[in-house]
Amino acid sequence: MIYILLPVYNEADNIPFLRKELADYFSKYEVFYVFSDDGSADGSVQVIKELFADEDFILLGDGTNHGPGYAFNLGFEWIMKHSKDPAVDKIISMEADCTADLSIADTMIKISDIGFDLVLASVYVEGGGFEKTSWLRKFLSFFANMFLRQKFNIKVLTLSSFYRLYSVNLVKKIKLTYGNVIEEPGFISMIEILLKAIKVKASIIEVPVKLLSDKRKGDSKMKKLKTSISYLTFLIKSDF
């Protein structure tokens, strides 16, 4: 089983396009869609219920905006509880705004099948990159990643992308080791779970991807100032 984990926050305009892309790329796999709504107020919940009515899916969330880390953790907890075969089941996490390039999903799955615990879709490895992303976003992303890699002695290049493939066994191992898969509620949560995966000696590999920002309808949900502050706070208090 492949669980497609999608945190959702006000993505009603993007979900119809996402629905078509998911159907196109995952039709040959046994998939279960796990939507973790983070307090959307634009009708996203109803759109999901209507468009995925014929699919296997669950819609999680309490109607409150907690942050993407909270939404991801909710999804991971549900998947760990319901996975029938954690040794072979996989989780593909991605944005719900259509910016993930699903054409590399087959490659990520095949790489996972040969034994990698975590496959990262990376804009920084050769062949990856940004499309129509603001220079400020690129600047902040590059220097944040560079500083964090030095701070925590991380060898991988992309640290904060949502687009990843996890083995369910890896997520369960992180949970067993740390008590929680994710504790940070904001975007820094992607750094947190990556550091935990490294600490439990997960086998990790990166594959190149293009960030397709031009496909997104509406603005990014990341608040740059708030996210920057959360990164600084994490750096100060982290004991990794």
Image: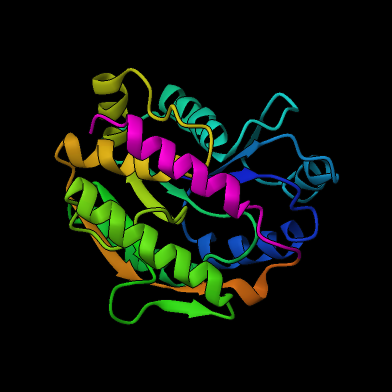
Residue 70 position (above or below residue 203):
above
Q: What secondary structure is the stretch in magenta mostly built from?
A: helix
Q: Nearer the viewer, residue 132 or 52?
A: 132
Specify whether 105 is left or right of 240.
right
Residue at (57%, 40%) from the top-left corner? 68
* Location of the C terminus (image quadrant): top left
Residue 35 placement: quadrant: top right
The one of 128 and 232 positioned closer to us in this rendering: 232
Q: Give how far across and how far down residue 22 sits, in percent.
A: 59, 60
Horizontal side, residue 118 vs residue 211: left or right: left
In which image quadrant can residue 161 be found? bottom left
Image: magenta residue range: 218-240
- Residue, x 39% and y 36% (percent of image)? 234
Residue 195 x, y percent position in the rendering: 27, 41
Reply above or below: 211 against 22: below
Question: Where residue 128 sits in the image (x, y, percent)?
Answer: 37, 77
